[in-house]
């Protein structure tokens, strides 16, 4: 009998047009939600609109600096590229944009346009178009502050310039560092970028994928990977790329193509970031 009465009470014996309960409040609430949505859409405040605006601005192309003497200078706009065993970079695209271009900034009073030398401290600042000039920064690893996937030393962007934003370039071959100390840093060659405070090398985690607004990308940390010879692995090798003076894209890629050393193969699955492009310039023979 109780089940029968419950089923009878739950059964709607009225038409959908009948107004019951707090119908007036619900009607005003729906109207408020609808007006709020229309107002946000008109002002471009919807999440989808904000994401599209962010992508449009932060992925817009950037003109990199050109080098006539083959060296890097303060004030140069460069792009950091990591070439691992199969041509790995932190992002899947190697086209310079607001998001991937950095300005070599002086921290010791060196004038803009002066040559950058090995072991000289500097900062890497984003271009001041949309990002407003953020500095590549890092700090010592702690239990609460570390990278998301690898748990190594975290690398991020911060608006304040301090000792945490200081980096220096060293020769990628440890046996040649002493004799190259103080010499100009050449552009478009392999180097190691060390954090001045923690002495950890900037690294890309080629096997750890992060899902971001811009797709699947590789995690970047500050961690020194050493092989059996106590030399940094290719995870720590970076190339500060500049533009071709002839105005035909990146000087590094054009040089590799002209020398016949860059053989790029299409990915079988373009949506898989772990499937790398192959380049014969990567002739490392280290165990991973």
Image (tube, grey):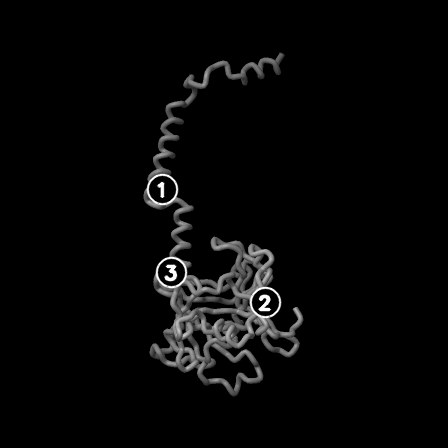
Of residues 258 and 193, the one nearer the viewer is: 258
Residue 197 in view (yes/no): no
The CA distance from mark 3 to mark 1 is 24 Å
Task: Farthest residue to the top: give it.
Answer: 1
Residue designated by label 1: 41
The CA distance from mark 1 to mark 2 is 44 Å
Say whether residue 288 is left or right of residue 98. right
Secondary structure at badge 2 equals loop
Of residues 145 and 242, the one nearer the viewer is: 242
Task: Farthest residue to the bottom: give it.
Answer: 179
Q: Residue at x 45, y 64 (%)?
A: 95
Residue designated by label 2: 278
Residue 67 in view (yes/no): yes
N-terminal label among 3 and 1: 1
Assess whether mark 3 and mark 2 are in contact (beta carbons under 8 angstroms). no
Query: In which quadrant of the rendered view does residue 124 lie?
Result: bottom left
N-terminal label among 2 and 3: 3
Q: Residue at x 36, y 59 (%)?
A: 130
x and y percentages locating residue 209 in the rendered image: 56, 58
Secondary structure at badge 3 equals loop
Q: Quadrant of the C terminus?
A: bottom right
Q: Quadrant of the N terminus?
A: top right
x and y percentages locating residue 277 in the rendered image: 57, 64
Say whether residue 149 is left or right of residue 165. right
Comparing marks 1 and 2, which lies closer to the viewer? 2
Q: Tag on residue 131?
A: 3
């Amino acid at each position: 009998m109780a089940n029968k009465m419950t089923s009878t009470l739950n059964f709607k014996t009225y038409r959908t047009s009948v107004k019951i309960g707090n119908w007036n409040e619900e009607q005003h609430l729906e109207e408020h939600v609808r007006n709020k949505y229309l107002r946000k859409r008109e002002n471009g405040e919807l999440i989808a609109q904000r994401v599209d605006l962010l992508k449009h601005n932060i992925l817009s192309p950037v003109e990199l600096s050109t080098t006539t003497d083959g060296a890097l200078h303060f004030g140069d706009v460069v792009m950091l590229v990591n070439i691992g065993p199969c041509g790995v970079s932190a992002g899947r695209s190697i086209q310079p944009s607001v998001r991937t271009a950095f300005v070599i900034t002086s921290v010791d009073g060196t004038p803009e346009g002066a040559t950058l030398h090995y072991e000289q401290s500097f900062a890497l600042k984003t271009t001041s178009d949309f990002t407003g000039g953020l500095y590549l920064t890092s700090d010592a690893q702690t239990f609460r502050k570390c990278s998301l996937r690898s748990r190594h030393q975290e690398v991020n962007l911060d608006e304040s310039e301090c000792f945490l934003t200081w980096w220096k370039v060293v020769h990628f071959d440890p046996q040649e560092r002493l004799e190259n100390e103080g010499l100009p840093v050449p552009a478009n060659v392999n180097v190691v970028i060390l954090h001045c405070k923690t002495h950890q090398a900037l690294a890309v985690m080629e096997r750890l994928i992060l899902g971001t607004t811009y797709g699947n990308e590789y995690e970047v940390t500050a961690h020194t990977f050493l092989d059996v010879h106590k030399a940094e692995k290719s995870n720590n090798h970076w190339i500060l790329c500049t533009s071709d003076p002839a105005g035909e894209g990146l000087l590094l890629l054009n040089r590799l193509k002209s020398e016949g050393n860059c053989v790029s193969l299409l990915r079988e699955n373009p949506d898989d970031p772990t499937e790398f492009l192959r380049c014969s310039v990567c002739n490392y023979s280290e165990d991973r």
